[in-house]
Image (cartoon, rainbow, N blue to C red):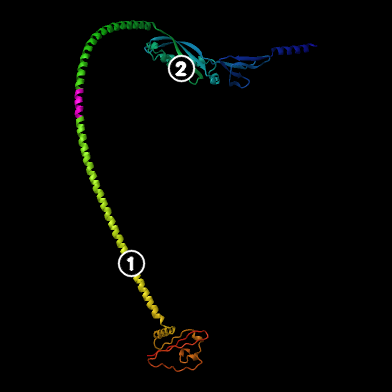
């Protein structure tokens, strides 16, 4: 084997020895964000606790990493020098409990970074403490400790809103007063103790006075109670007498009302009886009128029926007379009367022809000028003697018609 082959083999072995897999671990209570500079940068997915591979190392280390965040509650203590509402110096020790919001780790890492307490929470916390304590007196720090802590907590939350951090609580650990404040506090405590002693003495004297006053008050109360009982008895006696009098008046009024009610009831019954009598009389009168109307209507019906029957009998008699008169007249007499009526109707010099005369031979009526033909010689007209009635003449022609000729002269 030559030297060049040995060198290549050595390089391969060295490369294999230097090659490995880089990993990292996210501990419990922590969350991570994967950062790959050569593969899209920071990832949005939040990594849960566990072991994660960063990449292969070959002759150099991979640039990939995991930004680790502690998501448990963390406590930071701050010492703050500020002034009270009176302008006195105060040295305070306060603690703030906080943690990042897990669902907003990507925004926290990209906008603020892992050192978010020093960048955001710490400055806002210190500023809020100075502003809140400057509004309160030094005497309120022990009496209203909890309310002041809540006020600081609310102010810090307001200031860090939108910064992707959760503020759990704020606690006031200790307060160091200025020397002049401590002396004033000691003087105040001594004054309060002296005031308490004097109040105890005053209370003892007051108790003695109250005992004496209570004895006098008890005597007066007994006298007042006796007078009150006597007055009460007198009032009750007057009330009983008034009650008896009222009851007596009430009974008298009840009797008067009962009498008046009975009188009114009797009058009402009489009026009802009279009204019932009038009703019966009216019903009887109406019944009489109804019967009279029925009788009158019945009489009119009977009279109408009698008149109708009489008219019927009269008509029957007239019809019988007419039938009797017509029974003795023959058809010939009727015909004669008809011809006479026609003759009188026509007057003098009038000829009346009945039937289809065109087919009747003219020789049957030689004396009728209207029947003469143009080819025949006219016959002289012979007038009947005066006073003679016209005589009818009839002949049957080819059509079977009847012809009547009548001439009447004065």
* Residue 165 drawn at (x, y percent): 50, 18
Res. 304 mark: 1
Q: Nearer the viewer, mark 1 or mark 2?
A: 1
Q: Which residue is mark 2?
A: 156
* Residue 221 drawn at (x, y percent): 22, 14
Q: Earlier in the sequence, mark 1 or mark 2?
A: 2
One can see residue 373 in this view: no
Q: For mark 2, does the 10 Å Cα neighbourhood hold few (<14), some (14 to 19), or many (20 or more) residues? A: many
Is residue 77 found left or right of 135 in the rendered image?
Answer: right
Tell me the residue at 26%/55% (across/down).
Answer: 285
* Residue 354 drawn at (x, y percent): 46, 84
The stretch of residues the image draws in magenta is: 236-246
In whole angstroms, how far apart are the C-alphas of marks 1 and 2?
126 Å
Q: Magenta includes 238? A: yes
Q: Magenta includes 196? A: no
Tell me the residue at 46%/18% (across/down).
Answer: 157
């Amino acid at each position: 084997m030559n030297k060049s082959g040995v060198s290549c083999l050595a390089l391969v072995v060295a490369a294999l020895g230097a090659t490995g897999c880089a990993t990292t671990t996210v501990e419990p209570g922590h969350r991570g964000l994967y950062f790959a500079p050569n593969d899209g940068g920071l990832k949005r997915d939040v990594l849960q606790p566990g072991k994660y591979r960063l990449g292969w190392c070959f002759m150099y280390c991979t640039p990939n990493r995991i930004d680790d965040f502690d998501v448990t509650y963390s406590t930071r203590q701050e010492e703050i020098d500020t002034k009270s509402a009176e302008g006195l110096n105060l040295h305070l020790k306060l603690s703030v409990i906080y943690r990042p919001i897990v669902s907003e780790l990507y925004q926290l890492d990209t906008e603020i970074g892992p050192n978010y307490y020093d960048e955001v929470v710490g400055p806002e916390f210190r500023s809020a403490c100075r502003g809140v304590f400057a509004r309160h007196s030094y005497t309120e720090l022990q009496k209203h400790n909890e309310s002041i802590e809540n006020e600081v907590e609310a102010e810090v939350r307001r200031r860090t809103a939108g910064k992707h951090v959760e503020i759990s609580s704020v606690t006031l650990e200790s307060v160091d007063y200025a020397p002049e404040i401590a002396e004033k506090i000691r003087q105040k405590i001594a004054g309060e103790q002296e005031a308490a002693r004097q109040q105890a003495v005053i209370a003892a004297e007051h108790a003695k006075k109250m005992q004496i006053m209570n004895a006098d008050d008890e005597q007066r109360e007994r006298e007042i109670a006796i007078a009150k009982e006597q007055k009460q008895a007198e009032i009750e006696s007057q009330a009983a007498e008034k009650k008896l009098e009222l009851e007596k008046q009430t009974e008298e009024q009840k009797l008067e009302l009962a009498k008046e009610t009975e009188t009114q009831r009797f009058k009402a019954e009489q009026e009802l009886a009279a009204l019932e009598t009038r009703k019966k009389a009216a019903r009887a009168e109406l019944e009489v009128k109804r019967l009279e109307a029925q009788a009158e209507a019945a009489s009119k019906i009977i009279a109408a029926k009698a008149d109708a029957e009489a008219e019927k009998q009269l008509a029957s008699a007239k019809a019988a007379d007419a039938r009797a008169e017509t029974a003795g007249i023959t058809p010939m007499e009727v015909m004669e009367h008809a011809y006479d009526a026609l003759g009188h109707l026509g007057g003098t010099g009038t000829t009346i022809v009945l039937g289809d005369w065109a087919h009747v031979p003219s020789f049957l009526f030689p004396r009728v000028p209207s029947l003469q033909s143009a080819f025949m010689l006219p016959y002289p007209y012979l007038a009947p003697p005066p006073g003679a009635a016209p005589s009818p003449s009839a002949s049957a022609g080819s059509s079977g018609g009847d012809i009547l000729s009548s001439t009447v002269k004065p």
